[in-house]
Image: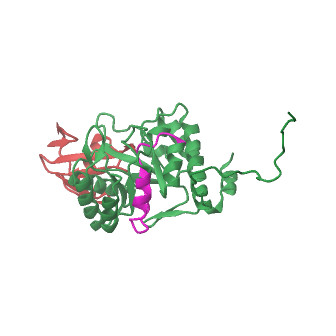
Amino acid sequence: MELKVNGSWRETPELPTVGALLTHLGVTHQAVGVLQNGQVVAREAFDREPLHDRDELEIVRFVGGG
Amino acid sequence: MTEQETAGMRPKELGSWSVGEYQFRSRLIVGTGKYATWEEMREAIHASGTELVTVAVRRVNIDKPDEPSLLEYVPKGVTLLPNTAGAHTAEEAVVTARLARAAGLGSLVKLEVIGDADLLWPDPVATYDATRLLVDDGFTVMVYTTPDPVLARRLAEAGAAAVMPLGSPIGSGQGVLDVSAVALIKARVGGVPVVVDAGIGSPADAALAIEAGADAVLINTAIAQARHPVQMAQAMRLAVEAAFLGRAAGRMPRRDRAAASSPEAGIVSAATKP
């Protein structure tokens, strides 16, 4: 499937959920935030929120800041 | 000095202050940006005595997904305050705040909506709009704002849990350019805590803000970019505590003329015979 992740389109295997994408990318499920097509995905919903071809996702974490 | 010794020496007059449901004894909030290393950041956080540190929300580097997390270097027991830095609209700020909450950081947020890229000056209109949206959504909102007494009052009325006027532009180290504004704001926000955020460059700047009536100060660059950040963190802590104790002690009134400290009577005569 084709997904836009953090600004770049990429080809991935068929992934059922947001949580499966995080695992595929090697991103921890802890302390990350996910925006799917402009909607915030609750952390508890990572493993049940379905992914669709052409979805646009932002995956964020916490970094140093003031 | 150990933590216990420090705690034992802490004067009770330093009291505590609250942001919504959160209560803090330290009146120093510290940023986590711009440190040379995370170890140094952790030591500076310890030395500052802070209980609240800001963090930013940014994209995961998909090419390096297993980079160590900043959060591993924040001491246990220190509350995290995610900011919305980088937002230029109310909508961007609201999404950033919701992402931080969804990531598990609770409902505390430092709202920052920038309206001028050179000055990193808050956009007052978008800041006010975002405050209302986030308060409605159940956030405890600490609002970075211009040092404007009327806007501060409006933000407090809109439900801001803290009003955070800038001292001078972010990262400029120019100090608190309008100290009198701090007192004017404090008198107009009906008990909402006032935090001077941005521009503090030295311990003296931090002390002036607290003496003027701020409940706390937020400092990042002045600590992180000092030649010795850990020592500067301790200096900021001492300055904030000294200023708060001094304010509580009640400063003497200013006078136009001198008033001798030594007795006027009994002054030795050194007149010599002609």
Task: Name the side, left or right, on which B139 lies relative to B269.
Answer: left
B211 or B114, which lies in front?
Answer: B211
Which hue is chain A drawn in? red
Task: Name the side, left or right, on which B245 lies relative to A10.
Answer: right
Q: Residue at the location (26% across, 39% down)? A: B117
Q: Residue at the location (81% across, 48% down)? A: B267
Residue A6 inside the magenta-drawn segment? no
Q: Residue at the location (49% across, 43% down)? A: B73
Residue sitting farthest toward the left: A54
Task: Name the side, left or right, on which B142 lies relative to A51.
Answer: right
Q: Position of residue B177 (x, y in %)?
A: 41, 45
The quarter of the picture where residue A5 lies is top left
Residue sitting farthest toward the front: B274
Instruction: Please provide the residue range marked out in magenta.
Output: B180-203
Task: Name the side, left or right, on which A48 lies relative to B259.
Answer: left
A25 or B114, which lies in front?
Answer: B114
Q: Position of residue A10 (x, y in %)?
A: 17, 37
Quarter of the image containing the C terminus of chain B?
top right
Q: How is the image coloured?
A: by chain
Please tell me whether residue B240 is drawn above or below residue B15 in the rendered image.
above
Which hue is chain B drawn in? green
How many dots with numbers? 0
